[in-house]
Image (cartoon, rainbow, N blue to C red):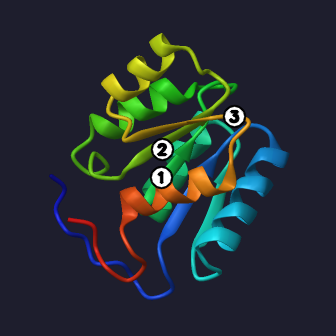
Amino acid sequence: MREKKARPAGGPKILVVDDEAAVCNLAGACIRHALGAHYRVSYARNGKKALEAVQRERPDLVLLDILMPVMDGFEVCRRLKSSSETEGIPILFLTALGEEKDIEKGLALGGDGYVIKPFNAVTLAAQISELLGPPGEPKG
C-alpha cells in the first residue's frame, strides 16, 4: 500500500512519455478533457528524457510507452521502481505491445497498470483515476 502523498496546488501532475508527438498530444488532451483542466501534463520523448523529467518534476503519475529510442519503457520502469526516491510514483504503461508476455513483464517490473494502444479515452481516464484517486485527495 502506498503512503498518502499530499499534492501541490494546481492538481495532479502527469508525465506522458512517448516518442510519437501525436500520442503525447492525444493523451494530454484526453486527460484534460476526461479528468479536468486542472491536471498538469508534461511530456518526454524517450526513456532517458523521462528519467530526467521525473527527477526534475516529481510527477504524481507516469504514463509510459514501451517502444522508444534511447531507452525503452521497461528499463525506465525498472529504474524508477528500484530507486527509493521514485518507487512510489505510479506507472501506467500506454503501449502497442498487447501480448500477455508484455503485460506480465510490465507489471512484474513494478508497473501499476497497462493500457493498450489504440486506447479509449474513458479507459485511460479510469485507469488514471484508479491510480491517483479523486483530484485533491491523496490515494492511500
Q: Which residue is mark 1?
A: 127
* Image spot of residue 97 (x, y percent): 62, 21
* Image spot of residue 130 (x, y percent): 39, 58
From the viewer's perspective, is 103 left or right of 140?
A: right
Q: Which residue is mark 3?
A: 117
* Image spot of residue 95 (x, y percent): 63, 31
From the viewer's perspective, is 124 left or right of 29?
A: left
Marks 2/3 in contact by CB < 8 Å: the verdict is no
Marks 1/2 in contact by CB < 8 Å: the verdict is yes
* N-term mark: 3 or 1: 3
Q: Which residue is mark 2?
A: 92
Category of crowding for the residue at label 3, using alpha-carbon neighbours closer than 10 angstroms: few (below 14), some (14–19), many (at least 20): some
Q: Label 2 amino acid? A: Leu
From the viewer's perspective, is 83 left or right of 112?
A: left
User: Label for residue 27?
Assistant: none
Question: How far is mark 1 from mark 2, CA to CA?
Answer: 8 Å
From the viewer's perspective, is 35 left or right of 130?
A: right
